[in-house]
Image (cartoon, rainbow, N blue to C red):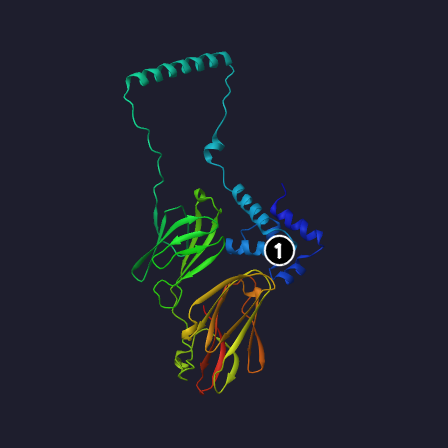
Amino acid sequence: MESLGNKLKNAREHKKEVYEDVSLKINVAVRYLKAMEEDDFSVFPGEVYAIGFLKSYGSYLGISADELLSLYRAMKLQEQPMPVEQLLYTRREFPMKIAIQILAAVMVVAAIAGGVYFALHLPKRAPAEPKLRATKEYVMNENPEERRLFLGDSFVVRYNETNYQFTLMNIGESLTIDSPLSDIRLDLGQEVMVDMDDDGFNELKIIAADFVKNYPDTGARLYFDLDASPPPPQMVNLETSETATSAASAPTVPATVIFSSPTPYPFTLQAAFQGFCLFRWEILAERDRQGRNEQYFERNGELSIQAQNGVRIGASNAVAVKIQVISGGRNVPVELGVAGEVVVAEIHWIQDENNRYQLVLTRLE
């Protein structure tokens, strides 16, 4: 059967494409393209990124994503080491076939006789019930931490002196995880951010790193990353024309100035996607537009966001999305980062020491 890497390589050579041209068209670094064609997925920062780049490369070459994922999982299964017992096993050959046959016949007769005896002399017992697997509870000891959970297993995350228990309830087309906060549903490779203490900021990231749809017996490998970083700087409140920050409390991460004005005004953020990307956004300081949004975008996808005070955005692959900020008759492009970089940033109004307002891009480290 054709390997995953050979399938990608043959498809690329059939299209008479070189690595450099493909890299520019789908925004994936050349070293990642070569690694996929060589079946070397150890160079990727995580399996989530390997799957995302694999889908993007396959889509460009015209290969079904399901077919590529099937080859990828088959390759991962073949990489599992053989048990030591099988490596040490040495087959014995018995040349005395007649002696073996006689011994086997004697053992069969003895087994039948013993079975008849016990059947006649022992009291009948109710059939034993099949043993059920005992569920397990794991406690987060490292950060981040990966753990394979089976149905009913729990993973406990301690945050601010409180234990939060996440229990795997179902493995179907997607995963269902029960938590004290709300039910969580995850597709393969998807990640979700969790607000642990309901303060408006996400502290825990959960990723469905690996599972086989509709096969609960194989369990699911989950990735937990607890990030208790402090909240980002506050935004300007346009309703009261007051600022919640000052020069003394300016963010430590350098900000990029997009617009400067005597007064703040609404703006539009336009995003154009060049490849597969998980994108999140949240409108800031607007009571009637609270809540976080997220969506997977493919190549040629588009998104338009209108905001008054600011917007918080996050991208799983910074180079896969091109951002433009439009307001006051001006259109300013904004660079988020490089290929494969996970970025969280805010575009928001702040007031400088001269009482002027600046619309800035702030990276949240």
In the image, 197: left or right of 32?
left
Q: Is residue 360 visible?
A: yes
Q: Position of residue 103 (x, y in %)?
A: 44, 13
Q: Position of residue 236 (x, y in %)?
A: 42, 80
Q: Is residue 96 visible?
A: no
- Kind of residue at badge 1: Ser
Number of residues whose C-alpha sits closer than 10 Å to that of mark 1, classed few (under 14), some (14–19) or many (20 or more): some
Measured along the vertical axis of the image, is residue 98 above or below residue 296? Answer: above
Q: Residue at x 42, y 74 (%)?
A: 288
Q: Residue at x 42, y 68 (%)?
A: 291
Figure quadrant of the C terminus: bottom left
Q: Position of residue 217 (x, y in %)?
A: 43, 42
Figure quadrant of the N terminus: top right
In which image quadrant can residue 243 be found?
Answer: bottom left
Q: Report which residue position mark 1 lands on.
A: 59
Q: Residue at x 44, y 72 (%)?
A: 289
Q: Position of residue 117 (x, y in %)?
A: 32, 15
In which image quadrant can residue 118 be found?
Answer: top left
Measured along the vertical axis of the image, is residue 36 above or below residue 271? Answer: above
**Secondary structure type for disc 1:** helix
